[in-house]
Image: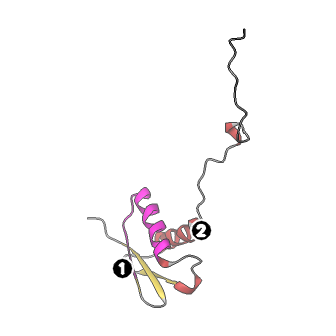
Amino acid sequence: MSTRKLVPPMNFKTVGVPEVPHGRNGKHKLIVTQILSDLDQVAEGVAIKVPLEELVESKEKVRSALNRATRQAGRIVNTASDQKFLYIWNEKTK
């Protein structure tokens, strides 16, 4: 009698950990990076004006991605929009 357990076959392929990508480049990374770069360059009291027609995703999704990025970076920004543009500006820290 054998005391060996039967091991079921693997369901997925394996890869070494050094080969695993460790960065998350979400689909909003480019636009969020561009917005943050522009916000770094504007003076206080100035908003950037992003045309909605140039956004690949909806303004709500871009706002959410921007909110996640700014929270992670410890920044405070505000947004507003109209029918044609998304406005974003740096908020003064108190």
Q: What secondary structure is the magenta-colored segment mainly?
A: helix
Is 90 magenta? The answer is no
- Amino acid type of the residue tagged 1 in the rendering: Gly
Residue 88 or residue 60, whichever sits in front: 60
The residue at 72%/38% (across/down) is: 14
Is 17 situated left or right of 78 in this image? right
- Amino acid type of the residue tagged 2 in the rendering: Leu
Residue 54 or residue 88, whichever sits in front: 54
Numbered-mark total: 2
The magenta stretch is 60-80
Residue 48 or residue 72, whichever sits in front: 72
Q: Which residue is mark 2?
A: 30
Which residue in the rendered view is the most extreme toward the front? 1
- Give the class, few, some or many, for how many residues have Cα within 10 Å of label 2's Cα (few <14, many ≥20): few
The residue at 49%/90% (across/down) is: 84
Residue 59 vs 37, above or below: the answer is below
Element at badge 1?
Answer: loop
- Residue 20 lies, in percent from the top left, at 67, 44
Q: Which residue is mark 1?
A: 45
